[in-house]
Image (cartoon, rainbow, N blue to C red):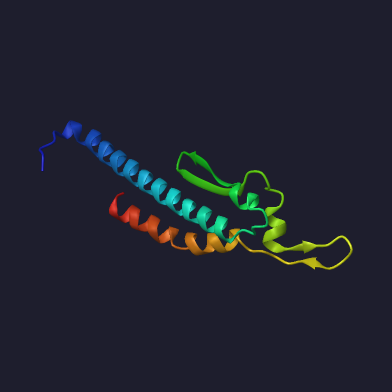
Amino acid sequence: MANIPIDRLADELVSAVKEYTDDVAEGVRKTVDKTARKVLQETKALAPKRTGEYARTFTITKEDGYGTTKRIVWNKKHYRRVHLLEFGHAKVNGGRVKAFPHLRPAYEKHAENLPDEIKRIIKNGG
């Protein structure tokens, strides 16, 4: 271990904490990106495919802020249709249209391990 003068101790501690924080933030960002890509791939595979356009237009939007990392999987062109297909809906003349769950099952399958992965990243320092 290096000998650090007492007047530089605070600077060295701040530097070490900043390096740890940056490593953890990068690890979390990579893990969230990987999970979002898995959810996107599974959503496209489970989506109804009459013409295939609906499944092709799913995309990921990144929203990073200070201390936050968000990835939103959504349908860029048919965003109004997603909840109707996901949960089913009422017909105009009565009755219901069958639900085609595709986004929620993909999210539940891949995102359930995300908190454990983030805890592991924090514990290991990146």
Question: Residue lying farthest top?
Answer: 7
Question: Please, is residue 60 above or below residue 99 in the view?
Answer: above
Residue 101 rendering spot, x and y as whole percentages: 63, 63
Give the left or right position of residue 43, taking residue 81 as reference: left
Residue 60 rendering spot, x and y as whole percentages: 54, 45
Frontmost residue, 106 versus 71: 106
> Residue, x 67% and y 60% (percent of image)?
86
> Residue, x 51% and y 46% (percent of image)?
70
Question: Please, is residue 96 above or below residue 20 in the view?
Answer: below
> Residue, x 73% and y 67% (percent of image)?
98
Give the left or right position of residue 4, taking residue 101 as reference: left
Count all numbered tags in the image, as a single digit. Answer: 0
Q: Quadrant of the N terminus?
A: top left
Question: Please, is residue 93 above or below residue 63 in the view?
Answer: below
Quadrant of res 26 = top left
Quadrant of res 61 = top right
Question: Residue lying farthest front?
Answer: 51
Residue 84 rendering spot, x and y as whole percentages: 72, 57
Give the left or right position of residue 71, taking residue 34 as reference: right
Frontmost residue, 10 versus 109: 109
Question: Please, is residue 67 above or below residue 104 in the view?
Answer: above
